Amino acid sequence: MSALTRTDIVNLALREIGTDRIEDYTESTPEADVARDVWDQAIRMTLSRHQWKFAMKGAALGRSSSTPATRYTYIYTLPGDFVRLGSVSSSSTMSPDLIDYVHRDDGIHCDETSVYIEYVYDAPAVGVWPAWFVDLAVVDLASLMASPLKSTTERERLEQLATKRLAVARSIDSQQGPPRRWPESSWVSAHRGWRAR
């Protein structure tokens, strides 16, 4: 975890761009103004890039009063802080995974009578961000601030840097828990000697 604040994150982004620091996130300077303009967009962009373990939570979804026009019976409404879908199940144990559904703008469309999800949410406090997420968020923020503060060329350089940092951050985050166990397919079962009767 980090003890960083929004001001700290902005200053790290400004250092990546090569411009002046700010004293406070709320001050009236060109750098702070631009940072506030793009903050939410930048952080949601970073959150949406991966199923970050520190930013995941679960929810039982409520059924919408609307119904799908085609294919499925129900629509389940996504939480207000939803950023990215992790897993979907008809059981609170999250096993087995639900595979017959569609994720649309208005929610999860399926035929199940109950739906549970694990998802990346839009509210982890800056102070709980792990270091690898901070590194990526800083460069995402810097890339959105670069054009108004410096140049489009600088933005392109920072976007390339973000791609490299994303690979590192995803690798580290993926090592923070046990590996996911996928259901065994019939082919694997047959290969191990099991035969259907």
Image (cartoon, grey):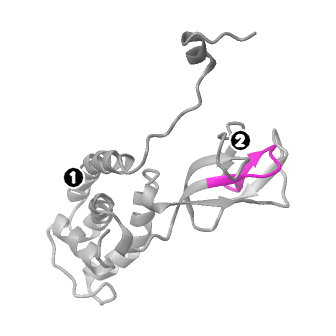
In the rendering, at what x and y percent does residue 177 appear?
41, 49
Q: Residues within 10 Å of mark 2 (few under 14, many from 20)?
A: some
Q: Earlier in the sequence, mark 1 or mark 2?
A: 2
Q: Quadrant of the C terminus?
A: top right
Q: How far apart are labels 1 and 2 at the CA level?
A: 39 Å
Closest to the camera, between mark 1 and mark 2, is: 2
The answer to whether any part of residue 42 appears in the image is yes
The answer to whether any part of residue 38 appears in the image is no
Viewer-closest of 144 and 108 = 108
Q: Quadrant of the N terminus?
A: bottom left
In the rendering, at what x and y percent does residue 164 appear?
25, 46
Residues drawn in magenta: 105-117
Q: Determine whether the residue tagged by mark 2 lies in a helix, strand or loop.
A: loop
In the rendering, at what x and y percent does residue 147 appear?
27, 64
Q: Determine whether the residue tagged by mark 1 lies in a helix, strand or loop.
A: helix
Residue 106's disc number: none
Q: Amino acid at mark 1?
A: Arg
Q: Amino acid at mark 2?
A: Tyr
Above or below 174: residue 64 = below
The image quadrant that residue 18 belongs to is: bottom left
- Disc 2 target residue: 101
Marks 1 and 2 in Cβ contact (< 8 Å)? no
Above or below 110: residue 191 = above
Count of numbered badges drawn on the protein: 2
Residue 157's disc number: 1
